[in-house]
Amino acid sequence: MEPYFEEVRELNLLESIEANPDITQATLADQLGVAVGTVNWHIKRLVEKGYVKVKRAQRKKLRYIITPSGIALRARLTVQYIEWSMMLYRKTRERVSKLLGELKDDGYQRIRIKVSDQGPDDIMDICRLTCLELGVDVVEDPDVPMLEVRGSKVFLHFPEAAE
């Protein structure tokens, strides 16, 4: 797994623990969409590094406490997440603007947008906003060029010419 995604997962864990110190690992796993074992591994890592302490609240209940160094880690991870998000936004806008320039150079003013997989909705939103700002209409017509969103990548496809 890429380090960035582990950092985002740790940020989400720290935020969830801060919001509810009595949260269970099963609930954390549901919130993050991962296995309980994955949550357990991350929590053990956070405990080993001194970012989180675990106290027994009741016989079978645990309470998670974020340490001051854990709060500093959460702040650092939040800044990194914002920086990464802004970089992704800028790169996506640059890419879509370039593709829309190609579209206009070929005489088109309309486009459709297709998401090919479970990519982030943010990329689709950036595509729509860029189209709006550059005066390109987003339509559902299969005969116009298509912006394809595949993960965090965007591709331009022109319709095949009729023979």
Image (cartoon, rainbow, N blue to C red):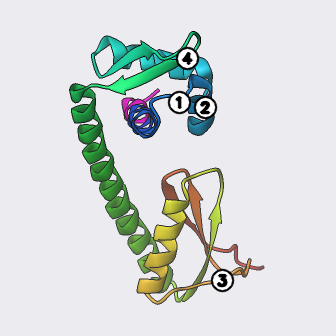
Residue assigned mark 4: 61
Q: Nearer the viewer, mark 1 or mark 3?
A: 1
Q: Secondary structure at mark 1?
A: loop
Left or right of 132, for residue 67: left
Q: Residues within 10 Å of mark 3 (few under 14, many from 20)?
A: few
- Provide the residue span drawn in magenta: 1-7
Q: Residues within 10 Å of mark 2 (few under 14, many from 20)?
A: few
Q: Residues within 10 Å of mark 1 (few under 14, many from 20)?
A: some
> What residue is drawn where x is 66% and y is 81%?
144
Mark positioned earlier in the residue sequence (4 or 1): 1
Q: Find the distance from the CA under tag 4 to the CA under tag 3.
A: 53 Å
Q: Amino acid at mark 3?
A: Val
Q: Secondary structure at mark 2?
A: helix
Residue 5, position as x, y percentages in the image: 43, 35
> What residue is drawn where x is 46% and y is 90%?
135
Residue assigned mark 2: 27
> What residue is drawn where x is 66% and y is 83%?
139
Q: Which dot marks residue 23? A: 1
Report the label total.
4
Q: Nearer the viewer, mark 4 or mark 3?
A: 4
Q: Quadrant of the C terminus?
A: bottom right
The reply to whether dot 2 and dot 1 touch (C-beta < 8 Å) is yes
Residue assigned mark 3: 139
Q: Secondary structure at mark 4?
A: loop
Q: Nearer the viewer, mark 2 or mark 1?
A: 1
Q: Residues within 10 Å of mark 4 (few under 14, many from 20)?
A: few
Closer to the camera, 63 or 34?
63
Q: Amino acid at mark 4?
A: Lys
Q: Amino acid at mark 1?
A: Ile
Q: Nearer the viewer, mark 2 or mark 3?
A: 2
